[in-house]
Image: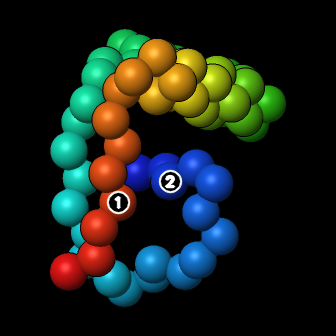
Amino acid sequence: ETHIYDYAGNLHGEAIDVEFGTFVRDECVLSSIQDLVSCIRDDFERVRAWHHEGGNVLLSGR
């Protein structure tokens, strides 16, 4: 599953290329929806921090 932060468009049915730029976290066991929400929120913060520190995010159309 891929999340594109700060994007409001609809890519449903579109083909996209995804390249992994950094490791975010190991797989974890979640016991509730709230745990899932917290985990995704933490993932976004880690990726945003990585991007701010110079990690490259490239979005391009075909």
Asked whether 31 or 49 is in front, the reply is 49
Give how far across and how far down residue 13 sits, in percent: 36, 85
Residue 40 visible here: yes
Query: Looking at the picture, does residue 39 appear above or below residue 1?
Result: above
Q: Could you tell whether 11 is left or right of 43 in the image? A: left
Q: Which mark is residue 4?
A: 2
Which amino acid type is marked by label 1? Leu
Q: Is label 1 in a helix, a strand or a loop?
A: loop
Give how far across and how far down residue 8 sits, in percent: 65, 70
Please report contact status of discs 1 and 2: CB closer than 8 Å, yes or no: yes
Residue at screen point 26% across, 30% down: 21
Q: Could you tell whether 18 is left or right of 13 in the image? A: left
Q: Quadrant of residue 15?
A: bottom left
Q: Quadrant of the C terminus?
A: bottom left
Residue 43 visible here: no
Mark 2 Cα shell of 10 Å, populated few (<14), some (14-19), many (≥20): few
Q: Which residue is mark 1?
A: 59
Residue at screen point 31% across, 19% down: 23
